[in-house]
Image (tube, grey):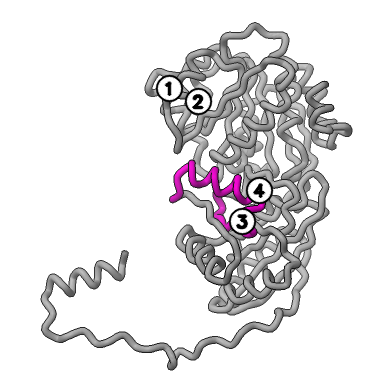
Amino acid sequence: MRALRDLNFTQPTPVQEAAIPPALLGRDVLASAATGSGKTAAYGLPLLERLAAASRGTTRALVLAPTRELAAQITSHLTALAGQTGIRVASVYGGVGFGAQAAALRRGTDVIVATPGRLLDHFEQRTASLREVDVLVVDEADRMLDMGFLPDVRRILAKLPAKRQTLFFSATLPPAIVKLAGEMLHDPVRVDLAPPKATASGIEQTVYAVDEQRKADLFVSLLKDNAIYSALAFTRTKARANRLAATLVKHNISAERIHGNRSQAQRTRALHDFKSGRYRVLVATDLASRGIDIADLGHVINYDVPAVPEDYIHRVGRTARMFATGDAITFVTPAEERLLAQIERSLGHRLRRAANPPLPPLVAAASIPRAAPQPAHKSRRTADYARGAKTR
């Protein structure tokens, strides 16, 4: 209770109000609620209450999360909630050193928050034993399924006690997750507070129609009027994220990027610097669409339309968290109209179209100098190198 006061938690959110009582009673819970609605505290508070009465020196709770960023965020939240209890929380995920994680597992840290792949690495190295786990939490269960973690999750379950409390929390509950929950949970209490394919009510959603070659110009133009003070921009690929960040910097807009080809240290630093205001724009792939909690994020920019409606929901859910308000802007090219139509059908309504601001004229293709012709006598080896350079 002192920690809650320190964090200014005065009113439970709907998912907390519905999930905490059955979780305190030891019931299994299957819960869905909109992104940013307080799911971590909904399972974290009863979990910590249970551990406060348990003996120390062995790991009693395991939280599984699909991404490093989400695991780090959960660890931070649980550590804050447990600040007055002496309960210890540690992260186990890839991209960082193995030794500190092995030490946390060896000494029986009370709560382990892990990604499936790295936890299995510890099992294989015999640095993890979770035979005393009383509570298992699967957070963002639908994302776990999307990312192909289901076989890993099953392998982890085989190493846990059969008699335990299991809590499933997610923003959506597709049929495959409900089926999986039926296998893993015992007589669960169902908490369904997120209508299928719903976005938070505080998000203003807008679409700009634009040709592919004008996307960067449109983004820069929108940023120049200073109405967008911070933005998380999503691209389809890592290469596009790199190019967009470089283009923004070229236009004197502070930007950084976060994606799977960056080291964990680089990703952590980029996110920290964005949160602290050093960067105005953070460019990301869908790696970051879940598990990133950014207070007062004003705008989400779908620079590329996501391939599936669920990714749209989780992208735009980075703003308007905990009942705040925010804006989600989507750039759509003629080739992406089909994807946008799928999203609108899933949402059940048409998104608002906006008129584009004036854009600078395109440089005529004829005015771009042509590359000098290659000499006809170049060697075969030189030709092969040139072809390889193109592919690289």
Of residue 80 and residue 19, the one placed in the foreground of this image is 80
**Disc number lying in front (2 or 1):** 1
Image: 211 above or below 344: below
Given the image, on which type of amino acid does mark 4 rest?
Lys
Q: Residue furthest right?
A: 11
* Crowding near the residue tagged with mark 2, few <14, some 14–19, many ≥20 C-alpha atoms within 10 Å: some
Q: Secondary structure at mark 3?
A: loop
Distance from Cα at disc 3 to Cα at disc 1: 39 Å
For residue 156, the mark is: 2
Q: Is 301 left or right of 353, judged from the image as shown?
A: left
Q: Quadrant of residue 231?
A: bottom right
Q: Secondary structure at mark 1?
A: helix
Given the image, on which type of amino acid does mark 3 rest?
Tyr
Image: 64 above or below 313: above
Distance from Cα at disc 2 to Cα at disc 3: 38 Å
Distance from Cα at disc 2 to Cα at disc 1: 9 Å
Q: Position of residue 359 (x, y in %)?
A: 64, 82
Q: Position of residue 104 (x, y in %)?
A: 51, 19
Range covered by the magenta-colored residues: 261-287
Q: Residue at x 71, y 26 (%)?
A: 44
Q: Earlier in the sequence, mark 4 or mark 2?
A: 2
Q: Position of residue 354 (x, y in %)?
A: 75, 75
Given the image, on which type of amino acid does mark 1 rest?
Phe
Of residue 65 and residue 169, the one placed in the foreground of this image is 65
**Are the residues tagged 4 and 2 within 8 Å (C-beta)?**
no
Q: Secondary structure at mark 4?
A: helix
Q: Quadrant of the C terminus?
A: bottom left
For residue 123, the mark is: 1
**Are the residues tagged 2 and 1 within 8 Å (C-beta)?**
yes
Q: Which residue is mark 3?
A: 279
